[in-house]
């Protein structure tokens, strides 16, 4: 139901603004400044005072069986309303503002290079910056040196350094869990392993007690909604509160440091998968990201970044000479990491993105995709650079649609330098919405996209060219913000 909001001027005068995890089912599709309330039984009201608009949903999820959910109903209704009624007070960027930041990587320039990570640099310096310190190590299976040796073992034997505890992010210390991570004990050293992906996602005062320094050493995949970024933000914030120094041992952005792609998240939609207003692909290393977060949020923490040596922004991970370690259970290759930045946007919808198969993020499908060949032909007809689509049928053995045969497409990367996976992900979503409007729940793309202008453009059926313009609208502004925090050429 839509009607003029008689209370609009009063609410606007009060200056109400909603930025809460409890409001995002509707708030992520409504403009900043909208207000509302969702009820336990299913009722909800959401209002946007500046446009004098409100939406009311009257239903009862607990009748007659005492259970049920209206979360998806609320999301779909609010997404439709947001796309139809709300726009932007600006036009999407065109021309230079929407162009690539720099030329794409040249695969021939980095052959044979042996990059040193921050861990390698610290090790070669005989751990001197940590001498006399009591340290906690935030790490996982990716925390290895150039020879493949684990940082836990190296630090435990370092002269003059006392390693007191270990902190594990999502997927656990060995990167094998696709569930909540429990606290534990390290078998080789007997040290406590504190989970940062269980009941607590921030280090507590008890976890930090007695520590001088927290060392962060985790390989990222270069994608905003990968949760290791958020764990780093929480480490910086809690270290500041408790007077603990943070040392980030830098590692390469595996997708290069030159391509910046995808919409910048709306700042009020911060969450565990949206830690800071950056694009989907920021082209930054973890060390550079840490510097940006500390600088822009003015976090009063003593931060040291131990930089990479011999890394250049144009390098893909397989050009560094470093050993590849799967950063999580479903990203097993560099190609999957690249596709994850686009296909991952679709994961919150009612699609399988290949979890539970041998090709996670290389295939997309659902039981209701009745014409895989037609879908592949339609996508290939759009001429997207760097990728082709093949019709497939597959059966995941876990995750979404486990045990069911689904139809869909396989993404085959033909030119990784030319490929823009975020554009591919949005185009996939738009094409599925056109071909299967009654089945595809496109509104859930906003869970990881977290950008109102782009999701509105997708849901209201803007052209693909205009959709891409909205997705890249804030690139120039971000590049200006990013410039002062870059460490490498």
Image (cartoon, helix red, strand yellow):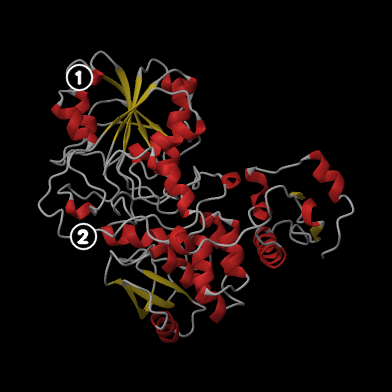
**Which residue corresponds to the image point at 62% horizontal and 77% vertical from the top-left?**
438
Q: Element at badge 2?
A: loop
**Which residue corresponds to the image point at 33% horizontal and 46% vertical from the top-left?**
220
The extreme left residue here reads 112
Distance from the alpha carbon under mark 1 to that under mark 2: 36 Å
**In the image, is 217 to the left or to the right of 32?**
left
| 242 and 473: which is toward the camera | 473
Q: On the image, which quarter does residue 425 sit in?
A: bottom left
Residue 171 in the image: x percent, y percent? Answer: 37, 45
Of the numbered discs 1 and 2, the one sitting upstream in the chain is: 2
Q: Residues within 10 Å of mark 2 (few under 14, many from 20)?
A: few
The residue where tag 2 is placed is: 106
The residue where tag 1 is placed is: 128
| 359 and 390: which is toward the camera | 390
The extreme front residue here reads 96
| 69 and 476: which is toward the camera | 476
Whether the residues at callouts 1 and 2 have beta carbons within 8 Å, the answer is: no
**Which residue corresponds to the image point at 46% horizontal and 54% vertical from the top-left?**
475
Q: Is residue 429 visible?
A: yes
Q: On the image, which quarter does residue 118 sit in?
A: top left
**In the image, is 249 to the left or to the right of 452?**
left
| 342 and 477: which is toward the camera | 477
Q: Which callout, 1 or 2, points to the residue nearer the camera?
A: 2
Q: Is residue 196 visible?
A: no
Relative to 458, does residue 177 appear above or below in the rendering?
A: above
* Quadrant (top left/top right/bottom left/bottom right) for the N terminus: bottom right
Residue 479 in the image: x percent, y percent? Answer: 42, 48
């Amino acid at each position: 139901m839509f009607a003029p909001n008689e209370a609009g001027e009063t609410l606007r005068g009060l200056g109400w603004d909603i930025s809460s995890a409890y409001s995002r089912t509707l708030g992520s599709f409504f403009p900043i400044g909208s207000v509302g309330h969702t009820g336990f039984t299913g009722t909800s009201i959401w209002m946007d005072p500046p446009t004098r608009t409100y939406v009311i949903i009257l239903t009862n999820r607990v009748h007659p069986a005492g259970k049920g959910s209206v979360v998806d109903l609320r999301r779909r209704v609010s997404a439709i309303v947001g796309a139809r009624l709300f726009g932007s007070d600006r036009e999407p960027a065109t021309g230079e503002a929407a162009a690539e930041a720099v030329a794409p990587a040249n695969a021939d320039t980095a052959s044979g290079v042996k990059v040193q990570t921050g861990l390698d640099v610290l090790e070669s310096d005989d751990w001197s910056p940590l001498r006399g310190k009591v340290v906690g190590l935030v790490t996982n299976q990716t925390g290895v040196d150039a020879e493949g040796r684990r940082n836990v073992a190296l630090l435990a034997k370092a002269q003059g350094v006392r390693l007191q505890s270990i902190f594990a992010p999502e997927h656990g210390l060995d990167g094998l869990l696709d569930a909540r991570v429990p606290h534990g004990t390290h078998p080789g050293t007997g040290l406590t392993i504190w989970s940062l992906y269980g009941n607590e996602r921030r280090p507590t005062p008890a976890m930090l007690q007695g520590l001088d320094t927290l060392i962060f050493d985790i390989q990222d995949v270069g994608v905003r909604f990968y949760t290791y970024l958020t764990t780093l933000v929480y480490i910086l914030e809690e270290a500041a509160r408790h007077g603990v120094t943070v040392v980030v041992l830098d590692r390469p952005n595996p997708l290069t440091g030159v391509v910046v792609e995808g919409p910048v998240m709306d700042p009020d939609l911060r969450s565990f998968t949206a830690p800071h207003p950056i694009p989907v692909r920021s082209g930054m290393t973890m060390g550079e990201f840490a510097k940006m977060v500390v600088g822009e949020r003015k976090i009063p923490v003593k931060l040291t970044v131990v930089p990479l040596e011999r890394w250049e922004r144009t390098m893909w991970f397989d050009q560094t000479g470093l050993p590849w370690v799967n950063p999580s259970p479903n990203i097993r290759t560099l190609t999957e990491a690249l596709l994850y930045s686009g296909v991952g946007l679709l994961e919150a919808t009612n699609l399988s993105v290949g979890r539970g198969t041998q090709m996670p993020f290389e295939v997309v499908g659902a039981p209701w995709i009745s014409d895989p060949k037609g879908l592949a032909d339609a996508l290939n007809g759009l001429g997207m650079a760097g990728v082709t689509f093949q019709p497939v049928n597959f059966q995941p053995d876990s995750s979404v649609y486990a045990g069911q045969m689904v139809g869909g497409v396989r993404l085959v990367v033909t030119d990784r330098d030319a490929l823009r996976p975020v554009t591919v992900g949005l185009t996939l979503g738009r094409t599925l919405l056109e071909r299967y409007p009654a089945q595809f729940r496109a509104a859930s793309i906003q869970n990881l996209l977290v950008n109102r202008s782009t999701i509105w453009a997708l849901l209201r059926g803007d052209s693909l060219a205009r959709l891409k313009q909205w997705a890249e609208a804030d690139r120039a502004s971000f590049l200006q913000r990013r410039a002062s925090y870059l460490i490498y050429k």
